[in-house]
Amino acid sequence: MGRFFGKVKTGKGRCSYCKGVFSKAGVVRHLATCAARPERLAESQDCFWLAVAGADDPRYWMYLEAPVTETLYGLDRFLRDIWLACCGHLSLFYIAGVEYLSDPADEDESDPDFYGDDYDDLAEKDMDFELRDVLREGMQFIHAYDFGSTTRLKLKVVGRRAGGKGDIAIMARNLAPDIECSYCANPAEKVCSVCQWDDSGWLCGKCAGEHEHGEGYLLPVVNSPRVGVCAYCGGDYEEDENE
Ligand SMILES: [Zn+2]
Ligand SMILES: [Zn+2]
Ligand SMILES: [Zn+2]
Ligand SMILES: [Zn+2]
């Protein structure tokens, strides 16, 4: 199953229904039987279970349920709201050889070369497609936000079942990883957007005050694979989402 679902340190996460904390592997088994979950399945509607993780940092992960009639635009919006949105960059899904672009009109800008020469003939579409028309159980696909300082997510369709609230919902999500200051052992509170690329930009409150790059470059440490990138300051659901 590759790096995404292989032996990576994925930490622990919390079930949104019962608030139990599990390993990433354990939470998948747990979600199938969580006693708090069936109460939320009153409406009869099919949902996809989706696994989402940072492609370059799998410590950040979520399990979502999304109505099969939700559109790619809706899923894109959800991912932006919780993990990505800084200043309105373009995004895309790459599913089974097709690019679905947030703004396909900007042809010149929407030409990321993520996939190598094999994909020169890539078909490009917008995101106005229902999930049930483009996804199948077991399928893996990619989401990319910002074609300059790109944050890539890997997604997988874990399964499909009846139920759901009618909106995309977080079933479980990683707990914020413990990140130490790059210069002492205190917990990092800020990340320098200049230094984060060589992993020396994590700063505790004290070291942030002495850092060579000023306040203007410092971003808050947030629970997202886009932490420290562009102007990203965190999403809509930083703590105890889905209440
Ligand atoms: Zn639970
Ligand atoms: Zn930005
Ligand atoms: Zn420090
Ligand atoms: Zn710096």
Image: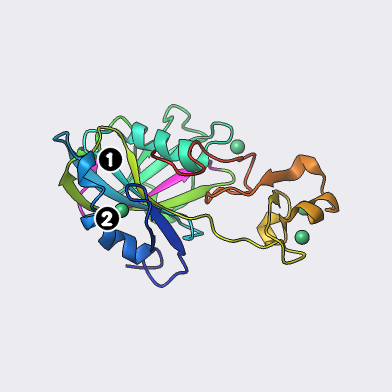
User: Which image quarter is the N terminus in?
Assistant: bottom left
Q: Nearer the viewer, residue 133 or 120?
A: 133
Q: Nearer the viewer, residue 230 or 147?
A: 230
- Work out whether 230 lies above or below 57: above
> Residue 116: horizontal and vertical position, in percent?
44, 56
Mark 2 sits near ligand 1, with its Cβ under 8 Å away: yes
User: Which image quarter is the C terminus in?
Assistant: top left
Residue that numbered label 1 is attached to: 66
Q: Which residues are magenta?
A: 133-147
Mark 2 neighbour class, 10 Å CA radius: few under 14, some 14 to 19, many 20 or more: some
Q: Residue furthest bottom?
A: 7
Residue 29, visible in the rendered structure: yes
Say which mark, if any, is on residue 91.
none
Q: Nearer the viewer, residue 181 or 193?
A: 181
Q: Secondary structure at mark 1?
A: strand
Q: Give the side of residue 223 with respect to residue 53, left or right.
A: right
Q: Nearer the viewer, residue 139 or 222?
A: 222
Q: Give the side of residue 207 with respect to residue 48, left or right.
A: right
Q: Give the side of residue 105 with respect to residue 179, left or right.
A: left
Residue type at mark 1: give it. Answer: Ala
Q: CA distance from mark 2 to mark 1?
A: 15 Å
> Residue 214: horizontal and vertical position, in percent?
82, 45
Residue that numbered label 2 is attached to: 31
- Work out whether 175 lies above or below 86: below
